[in-house]
Image: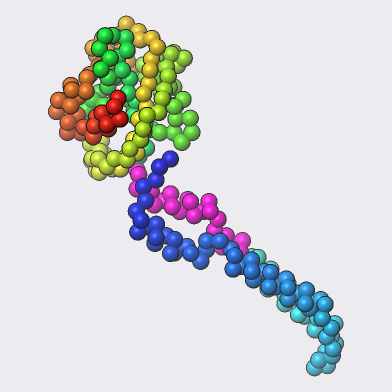
Amino acid sequence: MRLLVDDKDLQLLLEKKRDLIGNKVTIDMIIAGVSFMLSVITADYGVMLGVSGVIWKTIFFMIGVYYCAKRIYQMRKNEYTHETLYNDIKKLDEIQHNHSLVIIKNTFGEDIDNYLVYFDERWECKLFLNYKTQVYNDEQNIINNVSSDLRINPELIHCNYIASKIQEKYSYSHKENRIYNHRLYEVRIDQFDNEMKKNDFKKDKKHYYWMTMDQMQNDSEIQKKNLDVIDFVKEVGK
């Protein structure tokens, strides 16, 4: 998983948490307290202010116990581990969406420069297949989704990671600028059914099209809403 964190925000976080990162000072204090108790145990105390040495030794020893217990409590209460710091840094992440983009080429025909896209109702635009990125087993998740969407046996689907890129773009479905981490995958399908061999077809009410890069770049809606993704695919040579 990639994070996009502003350097100033990170510096401010580390400045705020500097006294909590690590427990070295507290541990040193506990060691000092234990050393004090050991010195009390080995020391001989005479009668002072009419009080026997045994009572003074007990008092001093109990003070040492209280001191150590208090420091241990503070250490546990204020524990700030590397995991806590990592979670705080993750909260600074400016990436709002992690999406996996899927490119599928027309390998059943002579022209393998055609790519599979679908019409997205929310964006009102033709897009590459895409799914929310999974932290674990993202490739298998893509295979499962492609299998479900196109009604293809998952054993006929192969998925390979290509590259990733952070992009800031306007989301037409949410009407605001958003930062995306796009992971690009190439999916190969061993066998296409006859329906998928048409220039455009429908699967489960979703409309799919085979388009070349030139056709996508000349499409007015793609130019307006998704040209940066097309450029990303061309950039990695796919």
Q: Does the magenta run of residues contain 97?
A: no
**Residue at image coords 37%, 51%:** 5
Residue at 23% over, 25% down? 126
Q: Give above or below for 9 relative to 171.
A: below
Q: Position of residue 19 (x, y in %)?
A: 51, 66
Q: Nearer the viewer, residue 44 or 238?
A: 238
Q: Quadrant of residue 173?
A: top left
Q: Is residue 59 left or right of residue 144?
A: right
Q: Nearer the viewer, residue 216 or 132?
A: 216
* Relative to 230, residue 63 above or below: below
Q: Residue furthest bottom?
A: 49
User: Does residue 77 appear in this view?
Assistant: no
Question: Residue 121 or 137: which is nearer the viewer?
Answer: 137
Rendered-image quadrant of the C terminus: top left
The x, y position of residue 212, in whole percent, is 22, 19
Give the quadrant of the N terminus: top left
Camera sees residue 162: yes
Left or right for 17, reference 68: left
